[in-house]
Image (tube, coloured by chain):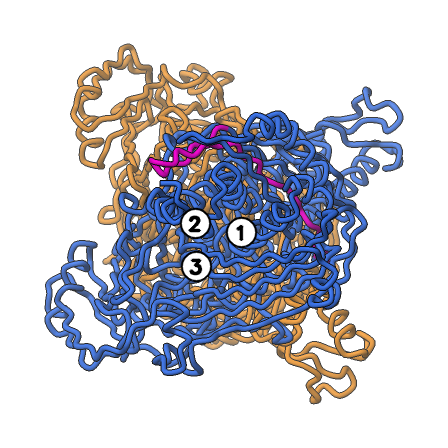
Chain colours: A orange, B blue
Amino acid sequence: MAVGKSPRRKDAVAKVTGRARYTDDFSMPGMLYAKYVRSPIAHGRVLRIDTGKARNLHGVEAVFTFEDVSDRRFATAGHPYCLDGSHPDIADRRLLTGHVRYHGDEVAIVVARDRLTAQKAVGLVQVEYEAYPVAVDAQTALSPDAHPIHKGGNTIDSHQFEAGGDLEKAFEAADVIVENDYKTPITWHCHMENHSAYAYMDDMEHIVVVSSTQIPHICRRIVGEALDIPWGRVRVVKPYIGGGFGNKQDVILEPMVAFLTLKLGGVPVKLELPREECFIGTRTRHATRSRNRAGATRDGVLKGLEIECVSNTGAYASHGHAVMGAASSKSCNLYPRGVIKLKATTHYANIPAAGAMRAYGSPQIIFGIECIVEEAARAIGMDPLDFRLKNVARQGDVNPLNKKEILSCALVECLEKGRELIRWDEKKDANRNQTGHVRRGLGVACFSYGSGTYPACVEISGARLTLNQDGSVHLQVGATEIGQGSDTAFAQMAAETLGVAYENVHVVSTQDTDVTPFDTGAYASRQTYVVAPAVKEAAGKLRDDILKYAALMTGQTSEALDLINGNIVFANRPDRVVLPLGDLALDAYYHKDLGGQLTADASYKTRTNPLSFGCTFVDLEVDIPLCKVVIRQIFNVHDSGVIIHPVMAKGQVHGGLAMGIGMALFEELLVDDNSGRIYNNNLLDYKMPTFMDIPDLGCAFVENREPTGGYGNKSLGEPPNITPAPAIRNAVLDATGVKVDEIPMTPKTLYRYFSRAGLI
Amino acid sequence: MAVGKSPRRKDAVAKVTGRARYTDDFSMPGMLYAKYVRSPIAHGRVLRIDTGKARNLHGVEAVFTFEDVSDRRFATAGHPYCLDGSHPDIADRRLLTGHVRYHGDEVAIVVARDRLTAQKAVGLVQVEYEAYPVAVDAQTALSPDAHPIHKGGNTIDSHQFEAGGDLEKAFEAADVIVENDYKTPITWHCHMENHSAYAYMDDMEHIVVVSSTQIPHICRRIVGEALDIPWGRVRVVKPYIGGGFGNKQDVILEPMVAFLTLKLGGVPVKLELPREECFIGTRTRHATRSRNRAGATRDGVLKGLEIECVSNTGAYASHGHAVMGAASSKSCNLYPRGVIKLKATTHYANIPAAGAMRAYGSPQIIFGIECIVEEAARAIGMDPLDFRLKNVARQGDVNPLNKKEILSCALVECLEKGRELIRWDEKKDANRNQTGHVRRGLGVACFSYGSGTYPACVEISGARLTLNQDGSVHLQVGATEIGQGSDTAFAQMAAETLGVAYENVHVVSTQDTDVTPFDTGAYASRQTYVVAPAVKEAAGKLRDDILKYAALMTGQTSEALDLINGNIVFANRPDRVVLPLGDLALDAYYHKDLGGQLTADASYKTRTNPLSFGCTFVDLEVDIPLCKVVIRQIFNVHDSGVIIHPVMAKGQVHGGLAMGIGMALFEELLVDDNSGRIYNNNLLDYKMPTFMDIPDLGCAFVENREPTGGYGNKSLGEPPNITPAPAIRNAVLDATGVKVDEIPMTPKTLYRYFSRAGLI
């Protein structure tokens, strides 16, 4: 049995030895290098652009400006194509723009024989701008006299719902109602590998794009749409990628490199963003502001929650419209027995575009919910953990919004496990009545999350298995390995169902839309869940065909035979090897009259979307005069169903926890209010926590078989990132009594709050 | 209907614009370059080898000698693996050798950072040899005291059969018996692209080999065998290749580059042979000598044929054992109503190894047959064309050797057509009683050929079709485009069966054994015939699935619908479009509950091997004092069943004719009898005919539906090459009365014959 074990990752050796090849490791003879000309103002329009000097620079092959590209608008959000128009993406991008919308917007592009010449040429493009007023936040962008950033105004999405009853009635039944405002920052993904893509053509009909993308098949479609060419003529290849965290769930560079090679007769053209451009020219996490309310009875029943959230999507819509929608609807699963009323508004502003980032809006929405819930508990004088235990989702609850029953849920068990791990009760007692400079606090926060995007989007996955002559198999999936370990998990599943050793499942890691089964890619923590049935189906088919062929070879019935650990055995005597799978494979391939290559394909649509649950527990101390938080212990406890690969699962949790701690205490992309310029577009000034800043990370799972899943598993990729921030904020509140209502809780922020509270 | 039309080749634009990328067009960062150290003697053994100086050269990364490689022997012949041992290939190669067997044998290999350093280092490897006696031909190699070139002696294969009766009895019934000796030269393939391959590893388990090969899947197996690693760990990628003609149906460089990357920690290592090394270090066409007899009655019945052929396979077996076997058994189909007795012997010699070359021994065997048959006709005073018309195979004849009925045969019609085209009878009359210096002659020669290798080898092919979102399809086949146009032919077939436009069938031209359906590759003129049923099956399946989905979408039954030219139409009203295929595809991909990616796979084993037939007619003049032959008109007339793509078919015939003319009049790789050295290992001294030397080439087809074929087609790739030489030789005989019994008929050769005959 391969599932539930922790075999060596398929890509372990390739990656730790540096042999793994990423997009930027590929080169082609004659390759050209492109570089954007970016606007030095955040809002305005180009009055004049002169590319003459740049064109004349030796080594420059071409310069294209916004005047040279089609007026066609396209959407960059990496969503599956929507057949019914129910979830339209917003087509607000041109390849280059004359109306600049953020400090760094792309007005032209230079193509040269080498990177340095391209860079030099960028400086020679002379552009004259007319400046428009700059709006960096909701207050200015949504004011009635705001300059429209796009046609149709600055609001891109506003939606609301009231689920589980009538909120005002629920609040009438409440003994206390608490209300507060919260603020979350712009953060950035900090994937190790920057954005990079190149394109070329062999003929003049097919464009090949090689890209560091999470979503090759979606990328193919968007390139086709952006360039108005049939999608079948676009081929997207994804090598190993060095992380994405949602930032490569957007199609940013690919349409441009495809355009360039098309214009330049098929010559390979590469576009790589250096880190500074990557920070501003790709996507960020949406900054949000919310005003939340919660009502509870004295005996600890959460009657209702109200969330009003405003989300800033920056210069282009990207995922903006969908992020709030997804996070809003997911939030209804956490406290499903209360009323939830939610309003979310997303607006444009003259800052870099926000897009998908790990957990897709949930860290923002859940931060507000888990803060206000904490305050409700405290308002009725109840232990916040007990309050949550009383109110969180349980198996059999019904989501008040979509009316779906929650089939598996171990959140209560997760909370109980966390209580134990962190020694909540013991520490709670010890922490009472602290008065010194350094005070300790305990915090907890809960989340629920989906396992895909159904029914908002189609959930389709594909797997293909081929039996090799040596009895090993090759596995091809459309789902993408982006560092999270999906290749390994799928290989485990295939090994499990097929009956061969994990080591004998070879995964074709590169996705190539010309030959890879269709799958929409890595996002929404979907892959392990939605790909599982495709792998299971393909492996089941191949296994059946193998046993049929074994029957043909041996004269047995296929029912009398079984495939275990790479051997055909007697079903009723699994210890008796009838023949090794390799011998069968050789016969199937090379028998002159019988057999054939044994392969199996599955294209599977998932029509379920189970919920994962979990929580963060934190024990920290706050040095009040230093305004510094030191985490003593932190645990994430997850119900992600059956854990496919415990070591990798732990790795996901560690990564998510660290990212969540970053959001809680360190990270923020800083915008100048007047100019819209980003102050810290680099890894020196953008304070991502390093190894020194991160405590030991604790992790536990409550395994719980999800009945709808291929292997009982549910999502795990994004969830660990959701609750560290509210848990830490709640622990700071626990330690100091101060409601810090914004993150990151840097010393600067804490100083403001602690001063205001009279602590210093 | 796409079959039978001549749409633009799929690779036309890529190739004529220079965009097509061949193995040597790919490079990888850090790539190293390898170069062989070749022996300067043709036979002997290495006494001492000192690589110290070479290793110390700056830029040299490694030097390996025969002492550093395993003692494991492997076979290089590109045949499918043989399950039952009935057609074993001869495992007589090591990666490097201490026993050198030809002038140029590989004793060591140098790996350096660039080509020049590698070349320089080769010169620094000091090797001391002990020389053995050199045997370059049968006479010396097969003499009782010959030094054994390999263990087991110098004969590698000797086989004989007598089919259709008893030859001596048949000869007793004959009125005349003619006997003569013939000699065919060593020729070389002269593919435009030299041999080139490189290998690398991403992890330490999988070796990727990129190679200019005709047979990627076979190459994978042989690399696995040569290195003793499981085949599933080898991946072979074949980009566009610039011709092979059989020389890339041998696995020559690939095991070495795989070995080198394995030894060097996965670093990419490339091995390219310059033209001079390619001439000697790859494969040639076997030189043969034969003694043939034919017996006929006065009324023109060919009673029997006897062929005794000796074939020189050079230093290594390669295909040697199989070439004579294949050509021998094929030869029984040409005059199936007579007795045929054949003995063929193949031996080693100290010259470059011979292997597969276009028509695989048939040009040699058929040369002898068509010469002796010509002489039989002349001996009874019958027009050689009439004699052939009387004796050649007809539909319904039974092959005397394998007892199979010939289901389709239009050889008589081909001969009649050729007679007309060349105006045989008219010219025959005009040519009578010539006496001048310049005399004209007419010649004819016939062939039959197979359409694959069954039942000697397994015939397996694979095709996969995927419906794209835009209604186009992608076609993947394991069969290889090597310049012959197979991608185009398969696309036509898919378009035909599926009901979409040829332009909307996109072919994945690169084979990659990790993802490409299994097929053994391009050889034996098999592909168009044996791949057709796989394409047909996959296209039929996909079409069925499309119509089923159309039924689901429209509420019609699938029987009521049809797919024509990319539209779903009503079966009984094909002019009424129900929906375009693109709309159906979008729905199948993106409907949230129904559908999936529509793909179809087929792995097909062909168990038939129909015969193609045809003939060459030539009208030439011989300038006797100048010993020069000028072709006035030449026609090949083919029965290849249904012609899939008339323009490409004509191209095949033109190419084969030109190659046949080269063999008849110009080409020979010249060996020094004493040293075994090749005199003319380059395209200046090896006299391949150029455009100036080749007359207008005539071509005609007698289309004849082969009942066993997917689209009524039979082989065509190799056949055009078989009969130009005997037809030209017979025309020279016709013109001069001189039996020139060896080719190429260069002025030097003709001078010898014409002097001996007293003509000059």
* Image coords of residue A700 (percent x, y): 51, 71
Host chain of mark 1: B
Distance between the alpha carbons at the discs numbered 3 and 2:
10 Å
Residue A461 seen in render:
no
Magenta stretch: includes residue B413: no
Distance between the alpha carbons at the discs numbered 1 and 2:
9 Å
Outermost residue, top direction?
Answer: A47
Distance between the alpha carbons at the discs numbered 3 and 1:
12 Å
Q: Earlier in the sequence, mark 1 or mark 2?
A: 1
Q: Which mark is residue B367?
A: 1
> Residue A16's quadrant in the figure?
bottom left
Residue closer to the observer: B447 or B589 = B447
Residue contact at pointers 3 and 1, CB within 8 angstroms: no
What residue is pinned by disc 2? B743
Q: Which mark is residue B287?
A: 3
Q: Amino acid at mark 1?
A: Phe
Q: Circle 2: is it few (<14), some (14-19), or many (20+) Cα within 10 Å?
A: many
Residue contact at pointers 3 and 2, CB within 8 angstroms: no
Q: Earlier in the sequence, mark 3 or mark 1?
A: 3
Host chain of mark 2: B
* Image coords of residue A198 (percent x, y): 37, 39
Magenta stretch: includes residue B620: yes
Q: Which residues are magenta?
A: B606-632
Q: Amino acid at mark 3?
A: Ala
Residue closer to the observer: A235 or A647 = A235
Mark 3 residue element: strand
Question: What is the quadrant of the N terminus of chain B in the image?
Answer: top right
